Image: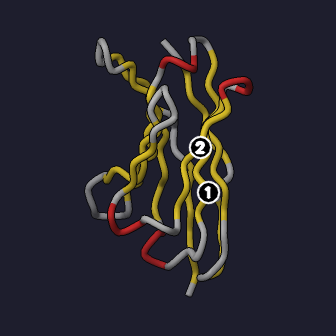
């Protein structure tokens, strides 16, 4: 089962950009679909973006055009590029790897993103 470590979060002003990384180890990264979720204080965790093992991507409707998910299988790493950030993007961002054939899933510990107005 793959282990995940997120990085790249931090404090940024509204309109700025951040790139989150999700580094995987202990498994065959390329067979997993990768999902980024986020959870703001007092709110439910929401799905931000998905990239399949084949590289197909999908986004939450509200985030299309601002966020881009990608993966580098050679580096066992997935990314979430976030542009034009808004204060409402403030949340803990989590990486999730799922092997869709079996449902086996792993989570990272999360990385905090704070967008100031």
Colouring scheme, one of rainbow, by chain, secondary structure, one colour: secondary structure
Residue at image coords 46%, 62%: 91
Q: Earlier in the sequence, mark 1 or mark 2?
A: 2
92 vs 113, left or right, is: left
Pick whichever, 32 or 25, lies toward us. 32
**Mark 2 residue crowding within 10 angstroms, few (<14) / some (14–19) / many (20+):** some
Residue 66, disc: none
Up the image or down, 21 lies above or below 27; here it is below
Residue at image coords 34%, 50%: 47
Q: Quadrant of the C terminus?
A: bottom right
Q: Quadrant of residue 33?
A: top left
- Horizontal and vertical percent for residue 32? 47, 22
Residue at image coords 63%, 50%: 20
Up the image or down, 33 lies above or below 102; here it is below
The count of marks equals 2
- Horizontal and vertical percent for residue 76? 66, 25
**Mark 1 residue crowding within 10 angstroms, few (<14) / some (14–19) / many (20+):** some
Q: Quadrant of residue 23?
A: top right
Residue at image coords 27%, 62%: 43
- Horizontal and vertical percent for residue 79? 62, 45
- Mark 1, residue position: 81
41 vs 75, left or right, is: left
Contact, CB < 8 Å: mark 1 with mark 2? yes
Q: Secondary structure at mark 1?
A: strand
90 vs 19, left or right, is: left
Q: Secondary structure at mark 2?
A: strand
Disc 1/disc 2 C-alpha distance (Å): 8 Å
Q: Residue furthest right?
A: 75
Q: Nearer the viewer, mark 1 or mark 2?
A: 2
- Horizontal and vertical percent for residue 108? 51, 34
- Mark 2, residue position: 70
């Amino acid at each position: 089962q793959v282990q995940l470590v997120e990085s790249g979060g931090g404090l940024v002003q509204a309109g700025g950009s951040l790139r989150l990384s999700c580094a995987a180890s202990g498994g065959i990264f390329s067979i997993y679909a990768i999902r980024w979720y986020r959870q703001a204080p007092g709110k439910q965790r929401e799905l931000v973006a998905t990239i399949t093992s084949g590289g197909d991507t999908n986004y939450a409707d509200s985030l299309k055009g601002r966020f881009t998910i990608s993966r580098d299988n050679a580096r066992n790493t997935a990314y979430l590029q976030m542009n034009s950030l808004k204060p409402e993007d403030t949340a803990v961002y989590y990486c999730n790897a799922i092997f869709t054939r079996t449902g086996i899933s792993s989570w990272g510990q999360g990385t905090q993103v704070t967008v100031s107005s």
